[in-house]
Image (cartoon, rainbow, N blue to C red):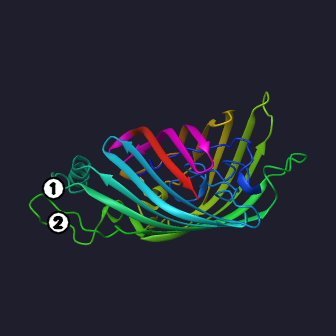
């Protein structure tokens, strides 16, 4: 349920010099829904913000995604050091309508319970990323990308949050939606390796950004449905990618994808998440990105797509 999250959107950058000799505008990407700089649903190897090798910068972000009976709100902040290291913290909140929780109860209890309250799932993410080698912007005489290694520690706050009925009773004490659907753990750490390259003047004079990320994770729907499952608790490698073209000095368009391992099955069967986005960068202090996101199957919502909006500020 949550794949929506997804939410995605990514961004590309105009080749305009930032003030005081710092990096190019937008060269750090936007902040994704998990708090890491890059695209909306996948990290890039670029460090967020506009720091040069002598500077420190800060960022803040807020995002919203609506998918019929689901809605996801995320917000967070980050700090980038010397164009080498990035740290971030993010809070995610998934709201699930009463209609969906009622239907889940009805199916799992074979009709014994048919009416439940709406519920929420919250998750905290603490991230770190370090540039290992390469320069994905200025080294144009080589095809070699910039490479970065990152980690995201995720803590689901509602794995065992009891679900209540309208009369106040709690039929399943200390059983939240993730446990109800088969999750095993309430926390996990994703490890990822990103390779990113900005190709100047390609194609047809436009700038092209490409990114590929490999992620080692056991998260169910990004961790919003917990981590692992009985009989399927091993982490797997997932693949993520981004492609974006700068169509004007302040506007980029592109698409991205993110695969997911289907551990829980049943109502929580997972699909590959894809999005198409447009991002606007009026200056180096702010970016606004809108995306159309397709999350595929969500519990009791087999076709889940919707629009996503994010605003990111750099200081």
Q: Position of residue 12 (x, y in %)?
A: 66, 43
Q: Is residue 245 visible?
A: yes
**Residue named by callout 2:** 171
Where on the picture, by quarter, is residue 185? bottom left
Q: Position of residue 3 (x, y in %)?
A: 45, 49
212 vs 255, left or right, is right
Disc with the residue nearer the chain's start (1 vs 2): 1
Residues shaded magenta: 277-302
Graded by Cα atoms within 10 Å as few (under 14), some (14 to 19) or many (20 or more), the crowding at tag 2 reads few
Residue pictured at 71% horizontal, 53% vertical: 19
Residue pictured at 39% horizontal, 51% vertical: 72
Where on the picture, by quarter, is residue 217? bottom right
Q: Position of residue 215 (x, y in %)?
A: 62, 59
| Quadrant location of the C terminus in the rendered image | bottom right
Residue pictured at 44% horizontal, 38% vertical: 307
Considering every residue shown, the one lying at the far left of the view is 167
**Residue named by callout 1:** 113
Q: Tell me, yes or no, whether the two marked residues, 1 and 2, touch with CB atoms within 8 Å.
A: yes
């Amino acid at each position: 349920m949550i794949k929506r999250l997804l939410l995605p959107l990514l961004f590309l950058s105009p080749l305009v010099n930032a003030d005081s000799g710092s990096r190019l505008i937008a060269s750090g990407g936007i902040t994704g829904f998990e708090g890491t700089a890059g695209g909306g649903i996948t990290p890039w190897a670029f460090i967020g913000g506009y720091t040069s090798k002598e500077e420190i910068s800060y960022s803040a972000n807020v995002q919203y995604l609506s998918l019929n009976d689901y809605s996801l709100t995320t917000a967070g902040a980050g700090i980038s050091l010397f164009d080498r290291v990035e740290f971030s913290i993010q809070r995610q909140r998934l709201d699930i309508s009463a209609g969906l929780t009622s239907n889940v109860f009805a199916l799992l209890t074979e009709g014994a319970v048919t009416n439940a309250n709406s519920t929420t799932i919250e998750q905290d993410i603490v991230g770190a990323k370090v540039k290992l080698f390469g320069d994905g912007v200025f080294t144009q005489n080589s095809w070699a990308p910039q490479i970065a290694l990152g980690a995201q520690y995720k803590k689901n706050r509602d794995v065992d949050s009891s679900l209540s009925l309208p009369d106040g009773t709690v039929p399943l004490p200390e059983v939240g939606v993730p446990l109800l659907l088969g999750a095993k753990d309430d926390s996990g750490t994703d490890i990822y390796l990103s390779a990113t390259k900005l190709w100047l003047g390609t194609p047809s004079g436009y700038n092209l950004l490409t990114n590929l990320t490999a992620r080692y994770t056991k998260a169910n729907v990004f961790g919003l449905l917990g981590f692992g499952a009985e009989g399927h608790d091993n982490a797997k490698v997932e693949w993520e990618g981004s492609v974006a073209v700068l169509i004007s000095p302040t506007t980029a368009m592109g698409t991205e994808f993110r695969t997911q391992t289907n551990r829980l099955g049943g109502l929580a069967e997972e699909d590959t998440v894809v999005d198409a986005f447009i991002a606007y960068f009026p200056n180096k202090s702010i970016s606004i990105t809108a995306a159309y996101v397709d999350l595929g199957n969500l519990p009791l919502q087999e076709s889940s797509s919707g629009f996503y909006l994010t605003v990111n500020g750099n200081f």
